[in-house]
Image (cartoon, helix red, strand yellow):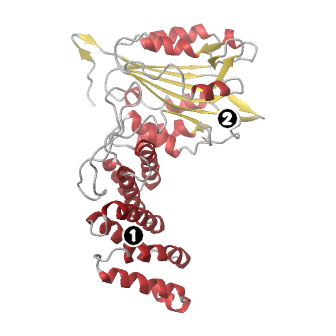
Amino acid sequence: MGFVGVADGVERRGHVLLLAGDAAVRRGGVLVAPGVNVAALAMVPAGVLLGCGVPADMVCLEGVRDPNTVLTRLRVAVGASGPLFVYVSGRLTADRRGRQLHVALAGTTAGSVRYTSLPWEWLVGELRSRSTGAATVVVDLVADRAAWPLVGEYGTLPGLAGLPGVEAFGVVRGPATPAGDGVAGGVSNYTRQWIDQLGRAPVRPSNVELHVLAAGSAGLAPGTLVVPSARELEMRSGAATGHLHQDPAPAPSPPPAPGTGSVVVGDPRARLHALAVDGRHGEADALARVWEQGVVERWGRISVEAVQCVEIRADLARMAGDFVSAARLWMGAGRARLEWQGADAAEVRDAAAGALYCWTQVRDRADALEAGPELVALLRALPLLDPDHLRLAELRLEALRTPDRSRSLHP
């Protein structure tokens, strides 16, 4: 990647600031080890974190006790002429008197929050003052018992949404999270997924895509605050038809997350297909599920847009060899389309044919027997479908119900 660090005769220089706050510990178990997270992230080249080839500086802060020291480093980072990447990991706490969020630093106690921790508003205020260059903020935090009620009250990380030129991503887990949950080898799963995705992809994914994949694959505890959420990554409307293996019109795309300008995931099918072909089926499924969730929240579960997502997930399941899930997803799509489009619609017939094919590939007798009646019912509702399809399904279902005859189905 060539340097693009000079504009209008002035060198653009990026900056990466990685801040490890205080660890979050519960009953002797570590909920987040910010020093380990920062050490792992520091192994990623600054240019990769920034997503461009400008020259860049990287600063790691760990074990800092004075919030003014952090503020000084933050001001230097924000003042960079090029892109900015800020990562914050640790324990989120609160000033009980003023009910303000703070990032606990080394040595912060319940009684010293106002003097030994970084006020969240300081971070937001410095980012607000930034006048040039894009900025990305990623957080991996655990809120303690003082901060968690405020997190629930805000429903997000306050102040970051809507800051010009700032993309904000991350997770905040609650104080009741079991020790070790969401942590692999000392590194938080969300942070680990960011690192893994950056290391694997031949072309750097967008920040939104990294966040979606990381949040979807991290095994987060129920109730974890995810920023931005699927609702905030609502899907745009669009005329989308067909499946991954076709060349259809573009599927609905998510709008920009708050403060991201024009940066969006875009049509994710090429990425989903690439992941599936590469054998990374879990990541493909995670991305597809988050994408579908946003569509459902925006358009409803029985919308055309949502059914298109179901069909894409069916194709992904087929590529992963999960024919049970693929058959059920195709059947669901077929039933939904039958209600809107009627039995003569090509999309309905395609869904039914996809369901039949995947069902015939199911080798577990119990699974095939359980799904068979629903498939036969769908095929019977489609008189224009090849009658051989219905006969095939009925014969196989009958054989499945007769154990001796079903043996012939398992070569």
Q: Decide: is 39 above or below 355.
A: above
Q: Which residue in the structure is indicated by mark 2?
A: 31
Q: Tag 2's secondary structure? A: strand
Query: What is the quadrant of residue 279 in the picture?
Result: bottom left
Query: Does 355 appear above or below 153?
Result: below
C-alpha span from label 1 to label 2: 43 Å
* Vertical comparison of 119 with 91: above or below: above
Point 22% across, 10% down: residue:
9
Looking at the image, the residue that sits furthest to the bottom is: 404
**Whole-percent x, y for residue 54 in the image:** 31, 22
The quarter holding residue 233 reads top left
Q: Position of residue 132 (x, y in %)?
A: 34, 13
Q: Residue at x 46, y 89 (%)?
A: 408
Is there any visible trace of residue 132 in the rendered image? Answer: yes
Amino acid residing under circle 2: Leu
Label 1 neighbour load within 10 Å: few <14, some 14-19, many 20+:
many
Residue beneath label 1, please?
355
Which quadrant of the rendered structure holds the C terminus? bottom left
| Residue occupying image coordinates x 31% and y 69% | 343
In the rendered structure, are the residues bearing label 1 and label 2 in contact, judged by CB atoms less than 8 Å apart? no
**Left or right of residue 276, residue 92 in this image:** right
Q: Quadrant of the N terminus?
A: top left
How far across and down, in percent of the image, does residue 210 sit?
A: 43, 38
* In-image side of 282 versus 334 (left or right): right
Task: Identify the mark nearer the N-term, 1 or 2.
Answer: 2
**Position of residue 247 measured from the top left corner of the image (x, y, whole percent):** 23, 55
Residue type, label 1? Ala
Circle nearer the viewer, 1 or 2: 1
Where is residue 29, by image quadrant? Answer: top right
Numbered badge on residue 373: none
